[in-house]
Amino acid sequence: MSKLLVEERQMVVPGQVLAEGMDYLPGDLVLRDKDVLVSQVVGVVGVNGRLIRITPLVGTYVPKAGDIVIGKVVAVGFSGWRIDIGWAFEANLGLKDASSDFIDKGSDLTKYFAVGDYLLTQIVNVASTKIIDVGMKGPGLRKLSPGRIFNVGAMKVPRIIGKQGSMISLIKEYTGCKVSVGQNGTVWLSGDNVENELLAISAIELIEKESYTSGLTERVKTFLEKNKNG
Amino acid sequence: MVNVTKRIDGRKQDELRPMEAKVGIIKRANGSAMFKIGNTIAIAAVYGPRELYPGFLQHPTKGILRCEYNMMAFSGSGDRVKPGGSRRAKEISLVTQRALLPVLDLSAYAGAVIDVFIELVQTDAGTRCAGITAAAMALADAGIPMKDLITAVSVGKAGGKLVTDLNYLEDSEEGGVDLPLAMSTRTGQVTLLQMDGILSKEELKELLALGKKASEKIKEVQVKALLDKFSGKE
């Protein structure tokens, strides 16, 4: 007889037994060890029928194809750029994926992206942990203009964006800031004045801190309304 | 069997020293934790996954765990510590790595390294166990997937009796036994078992049972510290 030992939205730690018996199935970050299901990380339980999954509260970003990330140019080579995307290894941005312009052999690539520039870019291919290709061809992908760059936990990004972008549009609406959040946890933010930028940052910090709770959109709304400038 | 005669510091034979744990104490690290048991205080910080240099040390299909154990110069009796690490520290770094590795899943981090730094701020025996216990929490805080939290405790023989969690006076007693033990309490898998001194087979069995019981208590402290951090109660 199978038994579920945790509740929906309960916070669990690695090694915690979630269910006994073979009737439940392991989802994300859940491990089957003989006849028990075990959590592999600190996270929140989600039960969907027989499937148990864990939404992690912490963890490092592991790149996968299709992710939109914010990266920093760290080197310019003969045929492309090296981009730091907050992962153990740098990603490669090749000429072909960088621009639709015709770029002559030997031309100065810093005209396009120079060292230190931040890019909103998409991961096009992950061949191995060490060979990652990013590209700039896609809607919204661009070199980011001056703004504030900071990092949040990569596992909190879905919460910061919200369902269909509800949370992030709330912040944009109340602060008037332009905000881009990469799946790797890097956030770019630019507003008309410092006060609004700081308000947006503290709202994002609030989401990060309370990401495991429900009814967060409402609380963020109240927070923004209370602290709204002008 | 365990009887109720008290020990040097007034504890019962199977009693642990007072424990305290805190997760997330080093903000810049990917994961960190402090574990205090009696007068022994261990701090662990996890950095990574990050690229491993030199490249020939990289593993093509999984990440590598690298542990560094260090007792701070002022932590023990205040003897001068020669720079560059000792043979003892090197050994403990190795056994720490081997104690933690069996529960970790590093398959997503091929070519990378996860560094675990363990510093003993204050020491009163049981340092490798405190270090491993802190490191397990720090790895969980860093979000490295693992099958269970590793819990470590030292058991042994002092004053002719089998005891749990020896302090320095008991540990350094002549003819005593010190048996550091690390395990996954969920599966009962033992990942570290060292011993100095002489024990009979029956005594060893009894000590392992004592160790398991103590590990379960330590694990409760680990779990509470992790839940406290992530539910904002820290």
Image (spheres, coloured by chain):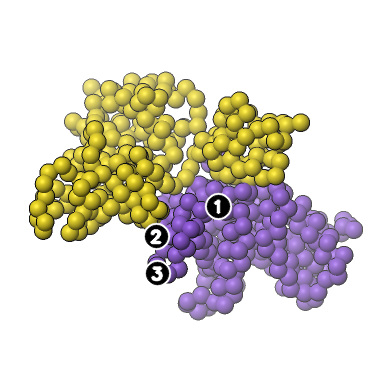
Chain colours: A yellow, B purple
Asked if the residues shown at circle 1 and circle 2 are in contact, with their CB atoms under 8 angstroms apart, the answer is no
* Element at label 2: strand
**Coordinates of residue A30 in the picture (x, y in percent):** 58, 40
> Dot 3 surroundings within 10 Å: few (below 14), some, or many (20 or more)?
few
* Element at label 1: loop
Residue in view at x 11 percent, y 50 percent: A103
- Same chain under badges 1 and 2? The reply is yes
* Chain of the residue under label 1: B
* Chain of the residue under label 3: B
* Chain of the residue under label 2: B
**Which residue is disc 1 drawn over?**
B105
**Which residue is disc 2 drawn over?**
B51
- Same chain under badges 2 and 3? The reply is yes
**Coordinates of residue B229 in the picture (x, y in percent):** 53, 41
Q: Count up the numbered dots.
A: 3
Tell me which numbered mark, 1 or 2, is placed earlier along the sequence: 2
